[in-house]
């Protein structure tokens, strides 16, 4: 049995969809904080189990009979290391044979603030003694295309990444990589730095948006504090605004660039091009 945490999230749903192409639905367990949100997965024949990262007692039942576990990093920034530790401990007690974790690109050296909790989680996984695979996911292209509506209304893409390059790929690409690892052999002990085949700057991203829309969309580079202020003004919550501004600054120093093409190798095809993701978002 293969289980996925956060199965109703954006990456989780795609991971389940990718697994369904490789194994029967009855061999997949979708673990969600709110089982009611997984009705679409249950309708496909996937077994749905409820477990909350903040409720340790729920994880014994959730992981019963699980051989392989995809631990998708939680979304509660600042609480994730403890939440992940709850799942790791439960997985060890359940004798899970392989734990696969979605970390962040260059976790050991990354200047992105998010990386600290990922480093702590990776250390806890190693200390558990369980066989593991670390998937250090790069930036999702959707992190950029989610702001397309605002960019079109303002006539510009805003950021603080300077000429930093983003080796992004689609969430679907990363989900396929997770499914590939969960359904094939020879991955235990591996740490994969996963990123898109082709990198781009935010100016190049803005240029692609211009090309596809026929509108003049430029890139405006701001100081980090000003970019965060702009994000707050657009209605983003403080933690998200801080996260995005911090990530852009780190990207300006190379934190989100990688040309190793390990993602390409895992999924057996080229990663989704920026132009395709922009077209889909538009």
Image: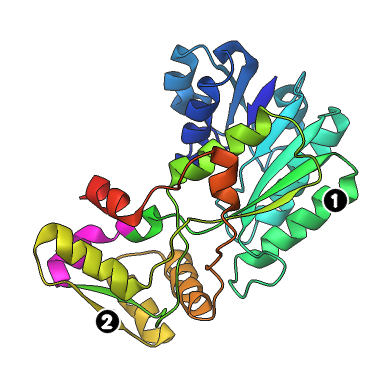
Horizontal placement of 29 versus 69: left or right?
left
In three-dimensional space, the C-alpha distance between marks 1 and 2, rounded to whole angstroms, equals 42 Å
Residue 103 x, y percent position in the rendering: 64, 54
Horizontal placement of 82 versus 199: left or right?
right
Q: Is residue 269 magenta?
A: no
Q: Quadrant of the N terminus?
A: top right
Q: Secondary structure at mark 1?
A: helix
Numbered mark located on residue 126 in the image:
1
Q: Nearer the viewer, residue 270 or 258?
A: 270
* Residue matched to label 2: 220
Q: Residue at x 67, y 43 (%)?
A: 54
Circle 1: is it few (<14), some (14-19), or many (20+) Cα within 10 Å? Answer: few
Q: Secondary structure at mark 2?
A: strand
Residue 160 x, y percent position in the rendering: 39, 80
Kindly give the residue lying farthest to the left in the view shown. Answer: 214
Q: Is residue 5 visible?
A: no
């Amino acid at each position: 049995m293969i289980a996925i945490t956060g199965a109703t999230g954006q990456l989780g749903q795609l991971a389940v969809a990718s697994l369904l192409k490789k194994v029967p639905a009855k061999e997949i367990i979708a673990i969600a904080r709110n089982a009611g949100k997984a009705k679409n997965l249950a309708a496909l024949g996937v077994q749905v189990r409820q477990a909350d990262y903040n409720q340790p007692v729920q994880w014994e039942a959730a992981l019963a009979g699980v051989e392989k576990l995809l631990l998708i990093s939680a979304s509660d920034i600042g609480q994730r290391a403890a939440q992940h530790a709850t799942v790791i401990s439960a997985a060890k007690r359940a004798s899970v044979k392989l734990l696969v974790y979605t970390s962040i690109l260059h976790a050991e050296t990354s200047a992105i603030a998010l990386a600290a909790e990922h480093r702590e989680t990776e250390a806890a996984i190693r200390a558990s003694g369980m066989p593991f695979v670390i998937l250090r996911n790069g930036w999702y292209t959707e992190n950029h295309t989610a702001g397309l509506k605002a960019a079109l209304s303002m006539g510009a893409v805003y950021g603080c990444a300077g000429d930093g390059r983003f080796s992004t790929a689609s969430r679907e690409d990363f989900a396929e990589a997770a499914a590939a690892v969960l359904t094939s052999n020879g991955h235990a002990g591996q740490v994969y730095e996963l990123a898109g085949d082709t990198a781009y700057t935010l100016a190049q991203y803005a240029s692609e948006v211009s090309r596809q829309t026929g509108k003049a969309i430029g890139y405006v580079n701001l100081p980090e504090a000003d970019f965060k202020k702009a994000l707050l003004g657009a209605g983003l919550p403080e933690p998200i605004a801080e996260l995005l501004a911090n990530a852009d600054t780190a990207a300006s120093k190379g934190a989100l660039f990688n040309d190793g093409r390990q993602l390409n190798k895992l999924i057996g095809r080229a990663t989704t091009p920026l132009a395709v993701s922009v077209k889909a978002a538009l």
